[in-house]
Image: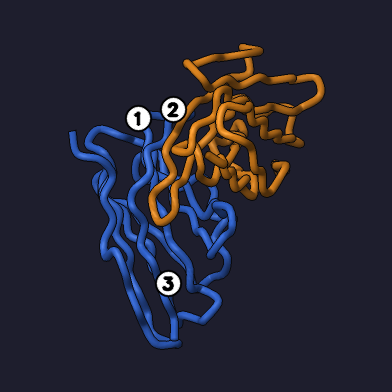
Chain colours: A orange, B blue
Amino acid sequence: GENVEQHPSTLSVQEGDSAVIKCTYSDSASNYFPWYKQELGKRPQLIIDIRSNVGEKKDQRIAVTLNKTAKHFSLHITETQPEDSAVYFCAAMDPGNQFYFGTGTSLTVIP
Amino acid sequence: GAGVSQSPSNKVTEKGKDVELRCDPISGHTALYWYRQSLGQGLEFLIYFQGNSAPDKSGLPSDRFSAERTGGSVSTLTIQRTQQEDSAVYLCASSHGKGDTQYFGPGTRLTVL
């Protein structure tokens, strides 16, 4: 089955700097890769996603890149703000529509 | 419209008791997912429904866990003879169809004493 690995597990950046979180997956047939933000005690919220027929997607300060050959995808947050502090999860969906999540990255943006 | 709802929000039970967790997906969403999130951990996939059918139940941790969905809407996750290691937040998500964006419910925090 699919195996998703996420790095780093914790990340601290200064406000205004960029943050990058990376995930790798094992099943080359996986075709949908969402990213979720989860604030403490709250439900995961989708922030951006990418499908396997696209290499990059951007939404304001957030971007995701996908390298199908290397089987990895990354989340990029530019001009970080304190409210970006949260746990971020990547996920990969296999052809059976099962989702496999990474173990999460706790991002702290220092004012 | 209304989002995904789950009940109860919190459940405290004694070891050995059965519990039933409920998920109300967004109206019209055909796909429904159950996940388990232990404290400080990622999301563990449990089961996925397309309509009332669950194509693959292999994600359920043990035969004490079962889930059903009726009428293509509400789903219940039942844990029999609960154990302390079952303590976690159980999250439900729904999506319009296969491979579409998932929207999560607020979760049920289960504590087994």
Question: Where residue B89 sits in the image (x, y, percent)?
Answer: 44, 62
N-term-proximal mark, 2 vs 3: 3
Residue B100: assigned label: 2
Identify the residue at image location x=40%, y=56%.
A41
- Dot 1, how many residues are within 10 Å of its Cα: few (below 14), some (14-19), or many (20+)? some
From the image, tell me which residue sits under label 3.
Answer: B79
Q: Is residue A105 left or right of residue B5?
A: right
Residue B96: assigned label: 1
Q: Secondary structure at mark 1?
A: loop
- Which amino acid, mark 3? Ile
CA gap, disc 1 and disc 3: 27 Å
Q: Are marks 2 and 1 in contact (CB under 8 Å)?
A: yes
CA gap, disc 2 and disc 3: 28 Å
User: Residues at marks 2 and 1, common chain?
Assistant: yes
Question: Where residue A73 sits in the image (x, y, percent)?
Answer: 69, 27
- Dot 2, how many residues are within 10 Å of its Cα: few (below 14), some (14-19), or many (20+)? some
User: Residues at marks 1 and 3, common chain?
Assistant: yes
